[in-house]
Every structure is written in C-alpha cells, then in structure tokens.
C-alpha cells in the first residue's frame, strides 16, 4: 500500500492507502472525489483526469509519454505540474504523493 494525498478544490486533503499498480485516477474514482471524471476509463483519450502534481513531486514521477503530452492539450489550466492521473501508476516510490484536483474537468 502506498499513501496518496488528494487535495480537492475546497482545500480538503484526503489521504488514501492505495494498491501499487493502480493508477492515481482509479483510486480517485473509487473514492468519488469530485473533479476527476475519467470519461475514457484510463485509456489516455479524454484528458478528464487532469491533476496538478505538487511541485516537489513532479520530478519524481515517471516521464510522460507523447500520448499523454498530446492529450494534455485538451485540458484546461495546464501548467508545468500537470499530468493525467490515469497515467500515473502507483508504486512504493510514490509514497506520500500529493496531487491537486481541479474544481472540474472541461
Ligand atoms: Fe481519460 Fe485519463 S481517464 S485520459
């Protein structure tokens, strides 16, 4: 288990013990966190799982691939800390990861 911290738009912090191998997106969906739609179910084809990774974590994540980079063009408010949460696989290395969930997806 790896603890992932979701900061929702209202400022509330939800720390979840997640299974390694799951995605940051699927854990958010299972916990009914508003702000993650995940319309494509994790196929990297909708960009409605966009999150802003806490700055101290962005360089600790695996690099994003070209498909994720292209899909992020369809998200709103993209910045240097943006990732698609369906593409972040949980592992021991991400213990304590903090992601900021947008108010809504577009
Ligand atoms: Fe669709 Fe992540 S769930 S791109």
Image (cartoon, rainbow, N blue to C red):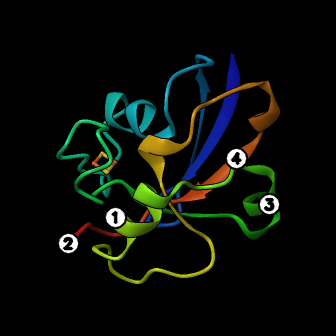
Q: Quadrant of the N terminus?
A: top right
Mark 2 neighbour class, 10 Å CA radius: few under 14, some 14 to 19, many 20 or more: some
| Precedes in sequence: disc 4 or disc 2 | 4
Callout 2 touching callout 1 (CB < 8 Å): no
Residue that numbered label 2 is attached to: 106
* Label 1, ligand 1: CB separation under 8 Å: yes
At x 54%, y 82%, the residue is: 79
Q: Which percent across, then down, holds residue 21? A: 57, 20
Compared with 105, 89 (above or below) is: above
Q: CA distance from mark 4 to mark 2?
A: 25 Å
Q: CA distance from mark 1 to mark 3?
A: 20 Å
| Precedes in sequence: disc 2 or disc 1 | 1
Give me the disc on residue 59. Answer: 3
| Precedes in sequence: disc 1 or disc 3 | 3
On screen, residue 14 versus residue 42, left or right, reads: right
Mark 1 neighbour class, 10 Å CA radius: few under 14, some 14 to 19, many 20 or more: some
Residue that numbered label 4 is attached to: 62
Mark 3 neighbour class, 10 Å CA radius: few under 14, some 14 to 19, many 20 or more: few
Report the number of numbered marks: 4
């Amino acid at each position: 288990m790896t603890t992932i911290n979701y900061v929702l738009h209202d400022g509330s912090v939800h720390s979840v013990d997640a299974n390694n191998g799951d995605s940051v997106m699927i854990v958010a969906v299972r916990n009914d966190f508003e702000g993650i739609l995940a319309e494509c179910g994790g196929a990297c084809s909708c960009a409605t799982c966009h999150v802003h990774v806490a700055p101290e974590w962005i360089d600790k994540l695996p690099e994003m691939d070209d498909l994720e980079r292209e899909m992020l063009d369809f998200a709103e408010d993209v910045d240097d800390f943006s990732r698609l949460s369906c593409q972040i696989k949980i592992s021991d290395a991400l213990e304590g990861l903090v992601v900021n969930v947008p108010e809504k997806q577009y």
